[in-house]
Image (cartoon, helix red, strand yellow):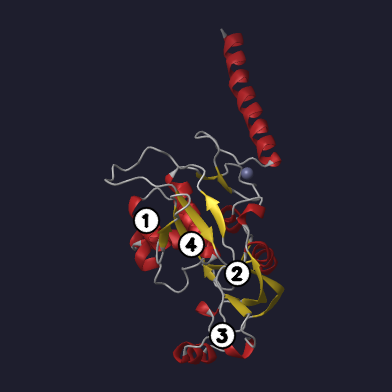
Amino acid sequence: MVAQQIRSKNSSTRRKGGRNGYEFPSVIETDWQLPKDLEVKPFAGKRRYMGTDGYSIFGRLEGRPVNPAKWKEPPHRTFVNLPCKPTSVPEMEMIDPNAMLGFIRRCGFLYAISQSDDPRMARGMSRLGYSDHLNGADDRLMPVEGSRNLQSISELALGLSLKSLLEDPTVPLSQALLKFVWQSNDRQILADFAQHASRGLASYCDFETGEIITTIKSVWALVCLLIVRDRAAGRTAVCANPECPAPYFLKSRKTQKICEAGECVAWAQRNYARKWWRENESKAAKGVAK
Ligand SMILES: [Zn+2]
């Protein structure tokens, strides 16, 4: 399969952080297949975290390589803004199944279970009730369970390190974790997340371009790396419009407070006009009083 490449636009010739070494241009190469015959079905496994409901997304890999050049919006921004619904457990939430389906159709499975030749793995999958659903080698299953919401993750992160949070089964691979990191200014939290995002990365140097190429195999890995890159560049932000339908956005200028959606621009203009009137009305009133 031909892997697709994402070149870093904000690569700089100046090294940040004062590290000793040589500078190389680098490329993240995506290497996974898009699925077909996608279907949302009831939760396939036996385990559900903290008794929340869940669902499964089934599909088959069709040998069509993912192509990031076709995405209008980068996958980290799309994923953190997918709508969630509350579950029967107050601190847990779940991504809307249809929104998740649309994301997978475009970007691929965030993570997926397939048949395994490893007998131990196969036994574990059968115990959890997954293997009954996987017949062909290309069959994939993504079980989605409830995960901690942003408030719950933020509260836990105050008491624990992000590293120990990532060991909690209701946290890893969750949207709320990414929302939390998206707006965190805590150096330790960002360092722990960068370490999570860098797990298992393998690079080589391309003989034609001299670039360091890092091939990644999952949407989750790409989403995490893009968040680390854009957080480091100070680009990740949350739209100031409380009604914004997709509030997690990437700033194109340092001072940007609202996302580029038409309704948010209009909201900011209305707000500005109101503020202007309030200030000028009182000035006018003072003027009259004198
Ligand atoms: Zn907005």
Between disc 1 and disc 4, the foreground one is 4
Kindly identify which numbered label has been placed on residue 215. 4
Between disc 1 and disc 2, the foreground one is 2
Q: CA distance from mark 4 to mark 3?
A: 23 Å
The answer to whether mark 1 and mark 4 are in CB contact below 8 A is no
Q: CA distance from mark 3 to mark 1?
A: 35 Å
Quadrant containing the N terminus in the rendered view:
bottom right
Return the residue at label 1.
189
Mark found first going from the N terminus, 2 or 3: 2
Q: Quadrant of residue 37?
A: bottom right
The answer, for residue 151, to whether it is visible in the render is no
**Amino acid on which disc 3 is placed:** Gln
Mark found first going from the N terminus, 4 or 2: 2
**Amino acid on which disc 2 is placed:** Phe
* Disc 1 element: helix
The answer to whether mark 3 and mark 1 are in CB contact below 8 A is no
Mark found first going from the N terminus, 3 or 1: 3
Q: Is mark 3 within 8 Å of ligand 1?
A: no
Between disc 3 and disc 1, the foreground one is 3
Q: CA distance from mark 1 to mark 2?
A: 26 Å
From what the image shows, is residue 283 above or below residue 229?
Answer: above
Left or right placement of residue 132 versus residue 170 in this view: right
From what the image shows, is residue 19 above or below residue 35?
Answer: above
Name the quarter showing ligand 1: top right
* Disc 4 element: strand
**Amino acid on which disc 1 is placed:** Ile
Kindly identify which numbered label has been placed on residue 115. 3
* Residue 98 percent across, percent down from the top left: 70, 67
